[in-house]
Image (cartoon, helix red, strand yellow):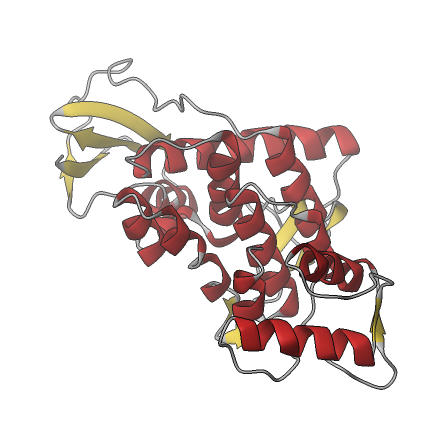
């Protein structure tokens, strides 16, 4: 498949896929809209064309044959949060609503109805990007996890990722294990991003993703760590045949149970429930 961008002199942008023009945006002469259009393209080359290169009305807009499911929308909302007033994200990008960034300016305010309107419009673009990039069959959970991933990181992160390469090779498990690698912003690891990547990985694998709203690297501490995520890990250990009482408190018995499980799986038996232990638990 060959892809090329044609930037028409009147501001329209088309991706030419095997000779077929597909409209991907109208920049209206604005650099920011051009950058956004290019972000959603996998083309490696471009050319500037006269205004009559692609007739107006020619080239159908790209559509997605798949849609994000309810679980995917809930995951996005849970991690993005809902903001009626503009704020700056961890790397300084002005954001509003549910991760909406296009045209956002300091002091901007919106209504709850506008939040849903922005979300619907934004998600559709990422559905198209995922649908266009993935060359293998996906179930609804896998597709939705990838839409959430792209929604948070941008489609180019998916296009250029080892995750996509492995997925298109048909290696679902290896692709799933790539999600946690994308937990940095501005070169710094963020716990919120780690939680989100683990949740997306769980959704991708058809596992419960809600426990990762509380995700932390569990270990024996004083005061002892506790909560729904601790109980979830304890329940997972119990299902693996490890004797433990799920009480939501990571105490001495949890430490011993984790170390026993790690020994069985030939992991470092340090009692720390990090990524490798989560993988061994099938999360």
**Vertical comparison of 270 with 29: above or below:** below
* Residue 157 visible in the picture: no
Q: Quadrant of the C terminus?
A: bottom right
Q: At 38% from the left edge and 50% from the top edge, which residue is drawn?
A: 158
Q: Please name whichever residue, 91 or 224, is drawn nearer the observer in this view of the structure.
A: 224
Tell me: residue 63, above or below residue 109: above
The picture places residue 43, in percent across and down from the top left corner, at: 21, 43
How many numbered marks have been drawn onto this rendered protein structure?
Answer: 0
Residue 80 drawn at (x, y percent)? 67, 50
Q: Residue at x 40, y 31 (%)?
A: 128
Query: In this orientation, does residue 203 appear?
Result: yes
**What x and y, as percent, mark residue 103?**
56, 44
Residue at screen point 24% across, 15% down: 58
Residue 150, x across and y down, in percent: 47, 46
The quarter holding residue 221 reads: bottom right
Vertical arrangement, residue 31 with respect to residue 22, above or below: below
Observer-nearest residue: 53 or 250?
250
Taking 127 as reference, is 252 left or right?
Answer: right
The N terminus lies in which quarter of the figure?
Answer: top left
Residue drawn where x is 40% and y is 46% of the image = 155
Q: Nearer the viewer, residue 214 or 260?
A: 260
Q: Is residue 99 left or right of residue 130?
A: right
């Amino acid at each position: 498949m060959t892809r090329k961008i044609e930037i028409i002199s009147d501001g329209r942008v088309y991706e030419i896929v095997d000779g077929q023009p597909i409209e991907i945006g109208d920049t209206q002469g604005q650099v920011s809209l051009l950058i956004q259009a290019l972000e959603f393209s996998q083309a490696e080359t471009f050319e500037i064309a006269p205004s009559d290169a692609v007739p107006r009305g020619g080239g159908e807009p790209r559509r997605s044959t798949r849609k994000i499911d309810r679980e995917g929308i809930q995951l996005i909302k849970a991690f993005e949060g809902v903001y009626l007033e503009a704020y700056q994200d961890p790397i300084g990008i002005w954001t509003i609503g549910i991760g909406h960034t296009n045209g956002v300016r300091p002091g901007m305010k919106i209504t709850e109805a506008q939040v849903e309107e922005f979300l619907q419009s934004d998600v559709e673009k990422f559905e198209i990007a995922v649908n266009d990039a993935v060359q293998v069959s996906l179930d609804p959970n896998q597709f939705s996890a990838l839409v959430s991933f792209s929604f948070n990181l941008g489609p180019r992160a998916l296009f250029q990722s080892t995750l996509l390469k492995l997925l298109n090779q048909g290696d679902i498990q290896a692709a799933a294990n790539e999600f946690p690698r994308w937990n940095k912003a501005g070169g710094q690891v963020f716990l919120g991003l780690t939680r989100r990547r683990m949740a997306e990985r769980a959704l991708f694998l058809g596992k419960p993703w809600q426990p990762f709203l509380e995700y932390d690297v569990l270990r024996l501490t004083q005061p002892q760590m506790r909560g729904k995520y601790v109980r979830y890990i304890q329940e997972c250990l119990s299902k693996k045949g490890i004797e433990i009482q799920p009480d939501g408190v990571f105490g001495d018995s949890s430490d011993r149970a984790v170390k026993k499980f790690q020994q069985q799986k030939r992991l470092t038996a340090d009692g720390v429930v990090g990524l490798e232990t989560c993988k061994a638990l099938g999360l």
